[in-house]
Amino acid sequence: MATRWNKNVPRKVNIHVWRLLKDRLPTHFNLWFRGIVNNSLVCPMCFNGIDTITHTMSDCRIAKKVWTSLSKWLDYNLPYQLSGVDLLEHIKTLKAQKKVKDIITTVTYAAWWYIWRYRNEAVFQPTKKRYNVLVDSIIMSSFQWYSSRYKKGHIRWDDWLKSPCLFA
């Protein structure tokens, strides 16, 4: 599998996605599989599934809410149930402008980054979190990353909020 570096996101997010695609993030299941003892394998976000990459990024009810909100915002049905590699391949084969693909990819990377951060906060600071803040963080950060790094055009914040793919 080729490395999928995205020039529109910070290096640490690219590294995170690379680890996600290789199933090398320290979920409770991955730690248990490597012999590191955990108190529980249960998802720290929803308490209703085993904490694996697939569950955390797509099957968890929190992740589903995030992807549903992002799909509505983008006006594009993201097939988030796919594996990370398959989702990126799906985006790559879209019949759309390169700029639209870049935007969707950047938002996807931001979603994976912030869902993981949300999950870690649930593990290390177990207080009730609101997923709305999570979606807002994804929208804001993806705009900042994209607009500061994409050199072939400019998109305004209010256009981004309406739907970035419409103004691409």
Image (tube, rainbow, N blue to C red):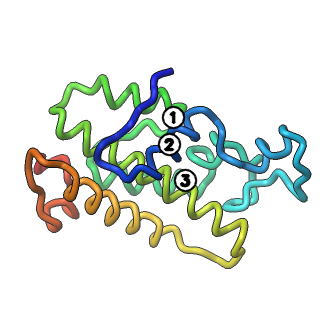
Q: Amino acid at mark 1?
A: Gly
Q: CA distance from mark 2 to mark 3?
A: 16 Å
Residue labelled with disc 3: 63
The numbered mark at residue 84 is 1
Q: Is residue 41 above or below residue 98?
A: below
Q: Between residues 76 and 15, which one lies in front from this camera angle? A: 15
**Relative horizontal placement of residue 109, taking residue 155 as reference (left or right):** right
Q: Which quadrant would residue 23 be assigned to in this image?
A: top right
Q: Nearer the viewer, mark 1 or mark 3?
A: 1
Q: Quadrant of residue 14?
A: top left
Instruction: Identify the element where label 2 is drawn.
Output: helix
Along the horizontal axis of the image, is 19 left or right of 138?
A: right
Which one is in front in this view, the residue at disc 1 or the one at disc 2?
Answer: 2
Farthest residue, direction bottom:
127
Q: Residue at x 60, y 54 (%)?
A: 61
Kindly indicate whether the residue at mark 2 contacts the one at mark 1 (C-beta within 8 angstroms): yes
Q: Secondary structure at mark 3?
A: helix
Sequence-wise, which precedes: disc 1 or disc 3? 3
In the image, taking residue 16 as reference, residue 30 lies left or right, namely right
Q: CA distance from mark 1 to mark 2?
A: 9 Å
Residue carrying label 2:
17
